[in-house]
Image (cartoon, helix red, strand yellow):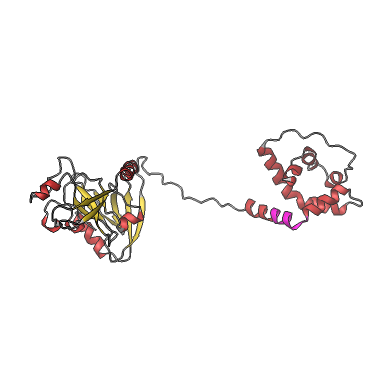
Amino acid sequence: MYLLLFLSRVHLMQSLKIPYVDCLSVRPSVRPPACPSVRPSVRLSVCLTVCLSVHQIMSGIQKVHRPSAEARELYSLLSSPHIQALLSSHDSVAQSDYGPVLPPLPDEMPEDEEAMRIVCLVKNNQPLGATIRKDEETGEIYIARVIHGGLADRSGLLHPGDMLVEVNGNPVVGLEPEQVIQILINSRGTILFKVIPNATFEIFKYHNFILLLRCQVYMKAMVDYCPLQDSSIPCANAGMAFSRGDLLEVVDQSDAQWWQARKMPCSVSCAGLIPSQRSVHAVRGGGSVPAPPAGEPPPHHPHW
């Protein structure tokens, strides 16, 4: 702080414009003029100028036959290891550009180009934990749901409503969901997804989080249920079988017809699909979950 105040003094700023010997031989009896307020940008410019001239100042002191006490004190201060290290660091920073060098944008890039996200997941022996669906009108492939506790859910990078553009460099728009699943099955190790994020997911996620905070649901099963025998379940492989009397922890109620739950005590981290309370009466009566209303995505969502 002392050095900053010293370098900001007006008589020092003025002295940089005249020979250093005249500056350093000033006697204590000569009182410098009062220092006016200096803007931060001007003060920084002065400090940088002085830092670059330090070696010249020290050389000027050495050439003086009888330097003043102030000049000797300044020489001792500027030659100390701490100040020398400070000046060396300044030179290193001033001569380097640490900002990222970004490539120029292509001239023909459309203005309405949607943001793209690259997601890299490492495949293991477990499923990635998500279901996909196809928009029959556009042929686009979307993530229908992310299974709680699965690899996709734990990564936090894939969300319901995200549009899949490529999988390991293979475009998937126009393919059938089963063909996309086959690409994933044939993939080994690292899987690279190119997706367009769902813009409304963050708002949905916040409201769903508040809902979960208000209500942590545990249920006791009153019926037997087998997803492989239920033709209305979106993905039988993602379903969870349970028996009468089982204790279930409901971890996701975002779908009005299909909840995600785990059997207690929990032995696996990945949840499974079960009928919601809205649909449980149909299951209890020996039927199946009602078909979704018009406009909602088709019930068949392959699991990967």
User: How far across and down, in percent of the image, does residue 157 sit?
Assistant: 35, 52
Identity of the residue drawn at 34% across and 56% down: 154
- Residue 191 appears left or right of 24: left
Residue 225, horizontal then vertical, whole percent: 14, 55
Residue 127 image-quadrant placement: bottom left
Quadrant housing residue 183: bottom left
How many numbered discs?
A: 0
Report if residue 143 is visible in the image.
no
85 in magenta: yes
Give the x, y percent position of residue 162.
29, 48
Residue toward you, 32 or 23: 32
**Residue 88 visible in the snapshot:** yes
Left or right of residue 182: residue 230: left
Left or right: residue 140 compared with residue 281? right
Q: Percent from the top left, x then y, of residue 73?
A: 83, 50
Q: Is residue 70 above or below residue 180?
A: above
Q: In the image, which residues are magenta?
A: 79-87
Q: Nearer the viewer, residue 276 or 24?
A: 276
Residue 167: say if magenta.
Answer: no
Q: Residue furthest right?
A: 66
Of residues 68 and 262, the one nearer the viewer is 262
Figure quadrant of the N terminus: top right
Q: Magenta span: helix, strand or loop, mainly? A: helix
Is 271 in front, or is 134? 271
Q: Quadrant of the C terminus?
A: bottom left
